[in-house]
Every structure is written in C-alpha cells, then in structure tokens.
Amino acid sequence: EPEVTQTPSHQVTQMGQEVILRCVPISNHLYFYWYRQILGQKVEFLVSFYNNEISEKSEIFDDQFSVERPDGSNFTLKIRSTKLEDSAMYFCASTGTEQETQYFGPGTRLLVL
Amino acid sequence: GESVGLHLPTLSVQEGDNSIINCAYSNSASDYFIWYKQESGKGPQFIIDIRSNMDKRQGQRVTVLLNKTVKHLSLQIAATQPGDSAVYFCAENIHSSASKIIFGSGTRLSIRP
C-alpha cells in the first residue's frame, strides 16, 4: 500500500540554525501539506501546496518557513532560523483529488536547543 | 469560528466492549469530517470519513455518526481490542477534502484487559 514517507525521523538543531524536513508524498498525489504537533497538543495546519505554489498558509507559517517541490517526488519544509518554539512533530500529508482524504506521513520530530 | 472540540480527553474501555468517542464542531460550513487514530510517535492514521450529505457511515468495526442539527460527530468502535489503544482525533474540512484539515484536541482511548 503506498504511503507518505518523511526524513529524518528525528532532528536536533541549535537555535538559529536552518533545517530542512523532507517528505515523499504518495506518487500520484497532487495536493501536499505540512502540519505540526507540539507535544501534547493537537495537530495544526501550516501550509498547503498545489500546482507548484502555496494554496493556503496559517499564521504560524511566517517568513521563516518555506516549502518547495524541487523535483517530481520530494516536498520539503525549510525553517530558516529555528526558534525554541519550533520544537514539534512535523507531519507531511498528501491527497490525490479534492474528493480523497489526506494521508499523513510518520512525522519528523524536531528539537531546537 | 472554526473549531472542533472533543467532549472527553480520556476514555477507558473493557476489552471486547464497544467504544464511543464524541466530538463537537462549531463551523456550519464544514462539509467533510474525518476520524484519525494516532499511536504514540506516529502520524495520524485515517480511520473513516463522512460527508455532510450523510448521517452514518460504516467501516470495518467502526461507525461514524453525524448529527448536523447539533453539530455532533461520533466514532463507534465495536469489540474494542488492545490494538485500538491510541489518541483519536476528529477533524473537519471546509469546502473540500483538499483544503486544510482542522483537528480537534483528541481523546485518548485505553483498553482494560
């Protein structure tokens, strides 16, 4: 069964450093998403991406965040200068059409020290 | 406003019994609802969904009920098993399943042997 994959599974970084989180969505999917989950809290929407551009972003997704689909398979989330409060699980999701549900990857646990 | 909330943060059920997890939503514009299961350290896993033109949908051992009049959603798990232990999130989309998912705060289901 096809699934969304994410790398790395864990990332530890120093405050102020740049991180890139990687996702490989399900291969025939067209809509891509990033969500995050701070420990013990609910999952929060960050950004959606379709047709090589951002469709929607939340207020969390400020200028420090960017997304890119550099090739036909990868979808990345970059945080330019990490802050302590960026520590969270980051989930990538994808869907093929507007009638299908979103499928989530296993997540990357980011810890900013 | 947009919000999806859960009535109970924790639910303890005897193995073999049925589980019922409830959820309230506040946005009348929501037209697609999803239940996700999240096990420790993993991403949200799709369980079942329902569109606003339905009031009941059944899957394997799971049933989702939607009451649009009182903006209430429930997930019923039949013959609960130890593997059902997880946090369950109700979630909603507005307008299409390709738009952002708004998650509720989650209910932790624990199974007593």
Image: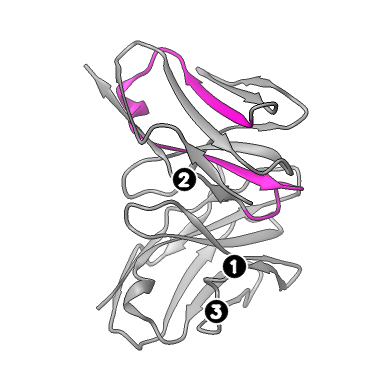
Question: In the image, are marks 2 and 1 on the same chain?
Answer: no
Q: Quadrant of residue A37?
A: bottom left
Query: Which x, y percent locates residue B105?
Result: 44, 45
Q: Is residue B95 left or right of residue B75?
A: right
Query: Which x, y percent locates residue B44?
Result: 46, 45
Amino acid marked by disc 2: Pro
Image point (76%, 68%), residue name: A51
Amino acid marked by disc 1: Ser
Tell which tag, 3 or 2, sits nearer the viewer. Answer: 3
> Disc 2 marks which residue?
B44
Query: Callout 3 environment at 10 Å: few (<14), some (14 to 19), or many (20+)?
Result: few
Helix, strand or loop at label 3? It is loop
> Disc 3 marks which residue?
A62
Of B51 and A108, which appears nearest the observer? B51
Image point (57%, 69%), residue name: A74
Of B89 and A12, which appears nearest the observer? B89
Image point (64%, 25%), residue name: B66
> Disc 1 marks which residue?
A58
Tell which tag, 2 or 1, sits nearer the viewer. Answer: 1
